[in-house]
Structures are given as C-alpha cells and as structure tokens.
Amino acid sequence: MQISDLPAVNATLNSLSAIWLACGYFFIRQKKISAHRFCMLAALLTSALFLTSYLIYHYHAGSRPFGGQGAIRTVYFTILISHTILAAAIVPLALITLFRALKQRFDKHKRIARWTLPIWFYVSVTGVIVYWMLYQM
C-alpha cells in the first residue's frame, strides 16, 4: 500500500463507520443492547482508524485542491466547511457519549447520544462525499 491509496481507504473507513452507526441505531431501537454496544464500539474503532490514516496521508501528501468550477465549487466548499467543523466537534461528543455509557449513566448517555449520532453520521457520510468530489469527479 502506498500513501496515494489512503484517500480511498479513508472513504471506505468513513463508509463503514456510517454503516456501524446505522446498525447501532437500529439495534438500540430494537432494545438489543449488546448488538448496539458492539456496533457503536466498531464505529468508534473504525473512526479512530480513519483519523489515523487521514493524519498520516495529510502529513505525507498535504492537501489536494478542488478542481471543480462554477456552482459545484460552492456545493463542495459548503459540504467541506460543515464537515470540518462538525468533525472537530464529534471527537469530544463521541468520547463523552462513550464514557457515559461505560459508567452506566444511561440517562445522560441517551441525552447526548441524540446529538452525537446524527452529527457523527453526517460527518461520516460527508467524508465520503468530499472524497468522491476530490478524487472521483
């Protein structure tokens, strides 16, 4: 594997994270606590692997400018800006949500998870969209 392969790896990890999150949400709605826990920990691990790979790639390769012109440029930067801001916010949100669950403070866990889940899902999905717009368009 080469550094140039990492953007595709990152998009795959983001996709997997979104899938784990969706499955975790489905399982908690079904009151399948063990399956929910497994999926959410898998989402956390997948996101941690993504972040590691992302940092390695950008350390070695820098950033890639967006080549699109016109309206698509505005769409790209709107997605990128919202993605970047929420990606920074999701790290502490996910960790707080996790620690509240581990401490079995499920009332507080549930309250913050209602914010954490949609933000985390949005960040994962828009990460794939950003990849697609940068490397596949």
Image (cartoon, grey):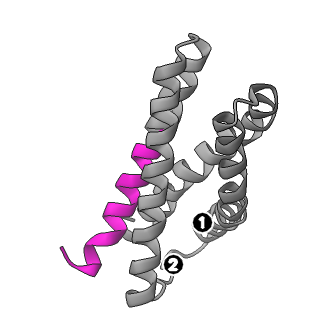
> Which residue is identified by label 1?
76
> Magenta stretch?
1-18
Vertical order, 34 against 51 (above or below): above
Residue 102 falls in which quadrant of the image? top right
- Residue 36 is tagged as none
The dot on residue 66 is 2
Which residue is rendered at x = 45% and y = 31% of the image? 38
Label 2 crowding class (10 Å Cα cut-off): few <14, some 14-19, many 20+? Answer: some
Kind of residue indicated by mark 1: Tyr
| Residue 79 vs residue 104, the one in the foreground | 104
Residue beneath the point at 47% across and 77% down: 55
As drawn, the residue found furthest toward the left would be 1
Instruction: Residue 110: tell me if it is visible.
Output: yes
Decide: marks 2, 1 in contact (CB < 8 A)?
yes
Question: Looking at the image, which is closer to me, 123 or 35?
Answer: 35
Q: Position of residue 48 (x, y in %)?
A: 48, 59
Residue at image position (39%, 65%) is: 137
Q: Relative to 10, is 97 above or below?
A: above
* Residue type at numbered disc 2: Phe
